[in-house]
Image: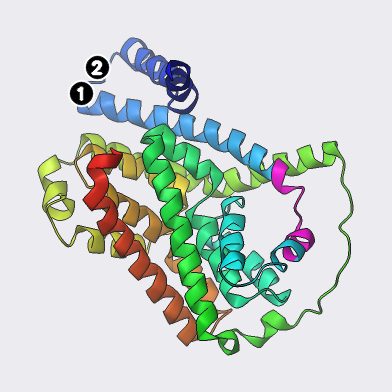
Amino acid sequence: MIIFQWLNSQLLKMEWLSDLVRLLIENGFKLDIGTRLGGSIHFFIYDVIKIFILLAVLIFTISYIQSFFPPERTRAIVGKYKGFWANLFGALLGTITPFCSCSSIPLFIGFTGAGLPLGVTFSFLISSPLVDLASVLLLASIFNWKIAIAYVIAGLILAVISGTIISKLKLESYVESFVFGEEKQDYEPEAISTRERMYFAKSQVLDIVGRVWPYIIIGVGIGAAIHNWIPQNIISAVLGQDKWYSVLIATLVGVPMYADIFGTLPIAEALVGKGVGIGTVLSFMMGVTALSLPSLIMLSQVVKPRLLAIFFGLVTTGIIIIGYTFNAIGHILI
C-alpha cells in the first residue's frame, strides 16, 4: 500500500514536479506561492506540464495497443455480439479511443455504414469522448482513484443505457442515407511491423496533442483564475453543494463549450477546491465532452432532427442524474 501511494504521488500526481515549480517561482520569480499571483503561476505551470507529460505517454501507449485493432477487425469483433453485450462492447470500445466528440463522429459513421446496430454505434459515440484510459489516470492524478473509477463506471452505464434505448426505438430510418452508402467489404487487414506501430502511436500523439493543446492551456488558465482570484462565496452562491440547481446549471453551461476532458480537468480541480460538489463538477465535464455544440452540429449532418433530439435528451438526462447521485455520495468519494 505504501509503495502504491508513493507511485501514485510521484508518477500520477507528480509531486516532484510541483516542488520543482515551487522552487522556480520562489527562487526565480521571487514570488510566494501563497499569494494570488504566485499561486496562479504555480497552478498554471505545474498543471500544464503535468497534463502534457501524462497525455503524451498515455496516448502513445493506448495508440500502440489500438494498432492491433484496425476498424475492419473491430467491426468483425463487435458484430458477433447482440443486445446488451453489443452495447457494452461498443461502450468499452470507446474507452480505448482517445478522441473528442467531433473526432468520434467519423468512426460512428464508419461503424454504422459497416452494418453495426445503431444503438451500438451510439454507445460508442457517447463513451469515446466521455471515458478513455488516459482520462482515468488524469482524473486519478488530480482527484483520487475512487472518483476516477466511479466516473468511468457512470460514463459506461450512461453509454450502454442510452444505446440500448436507441436500439429499442428502432430509429435507423432517422440516419441520413449516405451513411449506409458504402458497400461492405470483408477482408483481412494487412499485418504491420512493430516499427510501424511505433510510428502510428507517435503520429497519434502529435495529432491529438496538436488538436487539444489550446483547450488545455485555456482550461488551465481558467482553473488558475478560479483557484486564486474568484472568491469562494461567489462560486458557492451559484454552484454550492446546498443549491439544488447547481447540477442543472453546470450541465447546461458545459454544452455550448468545445473541449475535451483534458481541457476541463484543471477547471474541475479548481471548482472542487472552492467547495463545489463533485457531482456538479463531473456534470460540467460530461456536458462539455459529450454534448459540445460543435459536435451536435456535426452530428446533425449525419442524423435527422428526431434522432438528434432523442440522443441529446437521453445524454442530458443521464448526466443530470449522475451529477445528483455523485453529489449525494460525494462524502464517500472525496
Q: Quadrant of the C terminus?
A: top left
Magenta: main secondary structure equals helix
As drawn, which residue projects farthest toward the top?
A: 27
Pointer 1 local density, CA inside 10 Å: few below 14, some 14–19, many at least 20: few
Helix, strand or loop for disc 2: loop
52 horizontally vs 325: left or right:
right
298 horizontally vs 157: left or right:
right
Task: Identify which residue, 221 or 163, lies in the foreground.
Answer: 163
Helix, strand or loop for disc 1: loop
The magenta stretch spans which residues? 64-75
| Residue displayed at 30% across by 65% down | 252
195 horizontally vs 81: left or right:
right
- The image's colouring method is rainbow
Pointer 2 local density, CA inside 10 Å: few below 14, some 14–19, many at least 20: some
Q: Position of residue 312 (x, y in %)?
A: 41, 74
Cβ atoms under marks 1 and 2 closer than 8 Å: yes
The amino acid type of the residue labelled 2 equals Asp
Disc 1 versus disc 2: distance between alpha carbons? 6 Å
Query: Does the magenta-highlighted stretch encompass residue 71?
Result: yes
- Residue 109 seen from this side: yes
Give above or below for 71 relative to 219.
below
Q: Which residue is mark 2?
A: 32
Q: Quadrant of the N terminus?
A: top left
Q: Position of residue 42 (x, y in %)?
A: 34, 25
| Residue displayed at 53% across by 33% down | 54
Label disc, if present, on residue 35 of the rendered structure: 1
Task: Identify which residue, 250 or 71, lies in the foreground.
Answer: 71
The amino acid type of the residue labelled 1 equals Thr
Q: Position of residue 43 (x, y in %)?
A: 34, 30
